[in-house]
Amino acid sequence: MASKYYDIDDILTEEEFAPVLFHKPANRVTIDPSAETNYVEQGAKVELPFWLAHELHLRQAVSINLPASFDQKTRLEIQADAACVDLRSRCPYFYEFGCKLQPLVTDRTLGILLSTAFKIRYKERLTKVFTATHLTASKFLPFLTIEETNLYEAAHLSMTAFKKWRTGGPRFQRASILGRKRKES
Amino acid sequence: MYGRKGYQLVKDFASGEKGQLKPFNSKLFDETIEECRQNQRLIQSLMRKMEQEGLDVQNNRNADYYGALVHHLSLIRNKRCLMAYVHNRADIVRDLGWRVGLELPPEIQEKLTTLEKEYFKNHSAAIKSYMGKAGIDLNVDMVPPKDPYIKVRVVGDIDEGIVMSDKTTNFARHSMHFLKRTDAEPYIARGQMEELTG
């Protein structure tokens, strides 16, 4: 866990919202939008970011339910055709967030859902990176989650490196850290 | 409230291109710190309220306790976001030290704070002294070249009268030269020259 403290993707994954049910009341806290005062009632249903929900769950103040991105509608779509589901609009960190939720919610089927979705999408989409033209690839890129996009870019980079090795090219390049070249006027 | 500013700060960092810096967002940084202060003030007032009611803070889990807990967790979250922001930027600055050497082009300089520039200077000096003591230049290409000389074209502005290891040359713009690899490498990394193949 210590090594993920500074990890930007981990921080952004934990920002995803999850619905919780409060078992204890909380004073001077304005996270319940339906409450008029800054008080959270016992039994209130609120959407909290995962980092807060997780910590409160550890202290037995709340219980976590499955967010909408993992609901029945998404499950049916994944069963029908996993490769075409727009997972990014539901949850850009679908897999990471699902993995974090899995030990905390009572739903046993979440793990199976995640692994089947990933397997099908990997087989159908990500393996086609090497042969797909730019046009077909660009149609599906907006549907990929952040984790899948990272895999896609890694495959693309190794493909480019291989082509460069085959054809030969300048070995030295301007350090990529300096950013794109500005057009000289 | 509740980690929002920290989240915005991290999002700002993530929205830049991977491995490249955006200008240091001191406005968001200060706003995050201000949010931490608000959380701290609320924690203290809730703790005082509990003490006034004569309740032991450790053992009594009432509404005030959970309110203070939420604020405490938000503060820790903001701290994590601030630390991650600075840490990831420092990683990139260190990387710059290895790739680019001691001089930074001005467009990068304006993205760093004074502390980051200080860090960069010290780190580059440490690298240089390390390479001096080790006796070899660690920045050269790992693959042994077929030809120790390469053809380059000058694209940027370089000062006149640079001394190379075997001659002194004037680097006019768009002029082409036949240089030793090791001499040309730092200029290519900075984007002031480009290698000509074929």
Image (cartoon, rainbow, N blue to C red):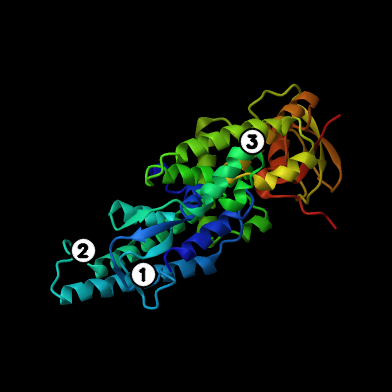
Q: Is residue A175 above or below residue A15?
A: above
Identify the amino acid type marked 2. Arg
Mark 1 vs mark 3: same chain? no
Mark 2 to mark 1 CA distance (whole Å) = 19 Å
Residue ID for mark 1: B39
At a point 17% along the width and 62% down the height, the residue shown is B58
Mark 2 to mark 3 CA distance (whole Å) = 49 Å
Identify the amino acid type marked 1. Asn
Residue ID for mark 3: A154
Q: Is residue B43 above or below residue B80?
A: below
Q: Earlier in the sequence, mark 2 or mark 1?
A: 1
Disc tally is 3
| SS type, badge 1 | helix
At a point 43% along the width and 45% down the height, the residue shown is A100
User: Label 1 is found on which chain of the structure?
Assistant: B
Q: Is residue B6 above or below residue A178?
A: below
Disc 2 vs disc 1: which is toward the camera? Answer: 2
Find residue B103 and name its label. Answer: none
Residue ID for mark 2: B61
**Image quadrant containing the N terminus of chain B:** bottom left
Cβ atoms under marks 2 and 1 closer than 8 Å? no
Viewer-proximal residue, A9 or B94?
Answer: A9
Where is residue B117 shown, x and y percent of the image? 55, 56
Mark 1 to mark 3 CA distance (whole Å) = 41 Å
Name the quadrant containing residue A51.
bottom left
